[in-house]
Amino acid sequence: MLPLGPHDLCSSSAREARQLFEAVARRPSVAGAAFHGDEERTFGLWGDVDGCTTAWRALPPGDEAVLASVVHVEGSAYRRPGAHMLVTRDAARVGTISGGCLEADVVRRAWWHTATGRPVVRTYDTMSEGDARWKFGLGCQGIIQVLLERVTSPSTQEYLAFLAAHRATRRAAVAATVIRTAERSTLAVGDRLLVD
């Protein structure tokens, strides 16, 4: 069993990274992203990574933003786990997390949902027939879970720097993010394991 602590950073061979990814992928409470060179592996979406990390680094000192990441999808959705969107206080955004179904709500509510400073997972159900917001020809017909986290968090900054570094050098990497925990768990939503 591999440990999933909040700040576990370790070097690993490609074989160990693959084993870790496979172990993490079997756990329903962890979202992951595996990157290998130029290729996307299951969850890697480099366009969002480039845009979000560039926008994050361009933020003036003291400015805040919220990173929204698709972490789980059931049914149909335009974007898959690993899609990112960065939202600033003035409602500017970079990246997408859906085909337009969710972005406005995330922009409008991201600051409220993250007011405590802790990451939170927000669930959007676009399958419900009783929800009038989703009845107007939207292509999403699924349940999409989105992790919202402030970029001022050291954990989120570490994650964005990790993504940017691995994208720039085209090195293989694995990122696993806790999206749900048990009541007495020592882990928290948003904790990550990042493996080179």
Image (cartoon, rainbow, N blue to C red):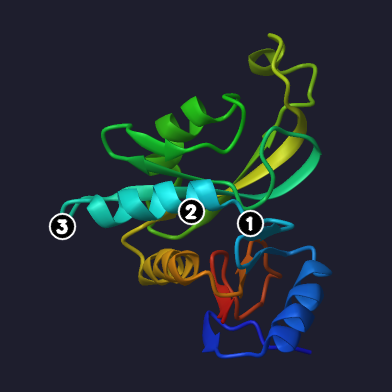
Horizontal side of 110 relative to 98 (left or right) equals left
**Mark 2 → mark 1, Cα distance in angstroms:** 9 Å
Mark 2 = which residue?
49
Q: Is residue 195 above or below residue 120?
A: below
Q: Quadrant of residue 130?
A: top right
Q: Residue at x 51, y 47 (%)?
A: 47
**Residue 98 position in % (x across, y down):** 61, 33
Disc 2 is placed on an element classified as helix
Closer to viewer: mark 3 or mark 2: 2
**Mark 1 → mark 3, Cα distance in angstroms:** 29 Å
Q: Say whether residue 75 is visible.
A: yes
Mark 3 = which residue?
61
| Label 2 with label 1: CB-CB less than 8 Å | yes
Q: Is residue 102 above or below residue 131?
A: below
The disc, 2 or 1, on the residue closer to the chain's N-terminal end is 1
* Mark linked to residue 44: 1
